[in-house]
Amino acid sequence: MLVHQREKIRELEPLKSMLVTVSEQCEKKLLAVKQEEKSDMLEMKKENQRLQNKISKLREEQVSLQVQVEKLQEELAAEYLRYRNECDARKMLIADINELKYQQEDAKKPNAEEEGEGKEDVTFLKLALKKAREDLDAKNLKLAAMEADYGDVVPRRDFERLEAQFNKSQKDMETFTVDNQKLMQEHNAILEVHKKVVDQRDQYAQDCEQMRRSATPRPHWEKCGQFVEGGTDRWNELSQARSSDELVDILLAEMTGQDIAIIQAGMNTGAEYFTGQGTGPEVPKFLRYEGQVRNRRLGKRDTSLLIKDIWQEKAAHDAEKPDGERDDLGEFLYQYLQRRFGVENMIIEWGYNLYDACGRYSHDPRIGLFYGILQKEIDEAVHHDQLVMLEKLYNAFTKVDLAAGNQGALSRADVEQCLRSFFPLKEDESMEALMKACEQEAPGESVQYKNLFTEDEEGRSGPFVDKIREQEKLEKTMYIKAIENALGGSSEVSVPDLRQAIQSVDPEASAEMVDKYMGRAFNTAVDQLETGTKIETTLLMKRLQSGSVRRLGAKPK
């Protein structure tokens, strides 16, 4: 097989050199096209700039000529007004002179005849003056009409000169527009050629990459199924129809516990330091600090080992207390860190890093349960009830084994019978899922039942125990949902309403357990419950979900 691969590599060597040659030729062609395009673009930009400058100058000349015409029109109107005033003054002066002359002549006439002739002359002159004034008014009206009609008219000589300049500018602009359109067409053609060359280059690069990948040994991704949580089945589900790059992202997400979208984006979510939450009483004791706390970036394995050790230490610590009392997990965590590290800075540093790691890996059932209890969102009794339930199931298997001769193993039929006896409320579908998980962990007719309950060094259990916990969580959710439906969708719930709802959903539940659930829902002792007390439905469901609540009898038919 190795010889065949080497021969195949030798056969591909000429193809590799040919690809390198073709790639270099494409690069040279691309550089040449870019240089030509760059020079053409510079010339077109210069020509376009020159044409725009010329158009701007022509527009400025046109504006300047328009301003000159308006100024000349204003000066002409002022001169005409001055002319009218001087003309009227001259006429009035002439009339006064004539009047004085006539008076002087009248005074010199010796007799009445001459006086009569003078009167006739005066009458004639008055008629002539009246006629002259009428002619003057007519001329003034005609002049005013002409001024109104031809006030904006410029001299023909100026008009013809400006018209010739405008026509010349119009022709130049049309020529420049045609040239610009041709240049734009050439530019677009060059861009199309450039795009085709780039597409060819990308295609060659893609072909080269595919050939390089085909000549590279592929990793055996199936090996990862042995080390990923959930085993080979979960890995096959995660890796189905994935590329190598996507499989690397999935592995990183499994190792770090970060969201795969953040890993694919290449973002670094972990800051170098945490910011202290303060020293107030609302802050857990192991997080009370002002300032910066170093981020150790705890991995999932270290987090699991630390949580496993904390549960072991707390179990031993709570065993010394009377009447089954338990310390708060947050308070005990501070004591645990204090015993283990001693120095206050190390206590705070490990407290913050453990809290951050629990948040990042909360998708893991064990870490998520610890995180929920630490945040007081889940009652610690949930954890202990799970341990007690698993211990009882182990004892049930042991009892059947002792009855069969203490062989350390059970037949598959005995395991199924024991499970049906221990979980009488489970449906056939759930029981089949448990048996399938058992077969996955212990294949064969003989089942080493002790191995089903064995944990690794990180506290991780096998598929069988994980399936039991998964079903317990689902059954709890369905049980609480049934109680919510029995309440009828009301926004507030009273003590009698909740008691009636629980008894209708789980009629075989004992009065003691019903009182226990009532006390958890209303967050008070059973003997202090009052009939008129009411609570919001959402808060009630949240409290039941956080506690150790489960169905105690068969579903009502």
Image (cartoon, rainbow, N blue to C red):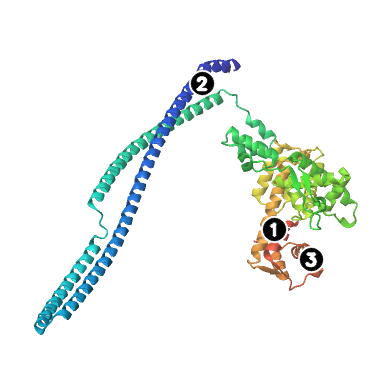
**Residue 101, position in %: x, y?**
19, 75
- 200 or 239, nearer to the observer: 200
- Quick one: SS at disc 3? loop
- Quick one: SS at disc 1? loop
Q: Residue at x 19, y 73 (%)?
A: 98
Q: CA distance from mark 2 to mark 1?
A: 74 Å
Q: Badge 3 is on which residue?
A: 524
Q: Badge 2 is on which residue?
A: 20
The amino acid type found where label 2 is placed reads Val
Quarter of the rendering occupied by the C terminus: bottom right
Quarter of the rendering occupied by the N terminus: top right
Q: CA distance from mark 1 to mark 3?
A: 28 Å
Marks 2, 1: nearer the viewer: 2
In this rendering, is residue 511 above or below 443? below
- 320 or 449, nearer to the observer: 320
In this rendering, is residue 326 above or below 265? below
- Give the mark nearest the N terminus, 1 or 3: 3
CA neighbours of label 1 inside 10 A, class few (<14), some (14 to 19), many (20+): some
Q: CA distance from mark 3 to mark 2?
A: 79 Å
Q: Badge 1 is on which residue?
A: 554
Q: Residue at x 35, y 50 (%)?
A: 64
**Residue 380, position in %: x, y?**
79, 53
In this rendering, is residue 130 above or below 44? below
Residue 468 visible to an observer of this rendering: no
**Residue 29, position in %: x, y?**
44, 25
- Give the mark nearest the N terminus, 3 or 2: 2
- Quick one: SS at disc 2? helix
Q: Residue at x 80, y 54 (%)?
A: 284
- 194 or 512, nearer to the observer: 194
The amino acid type found where label 1 is placed reads Ala
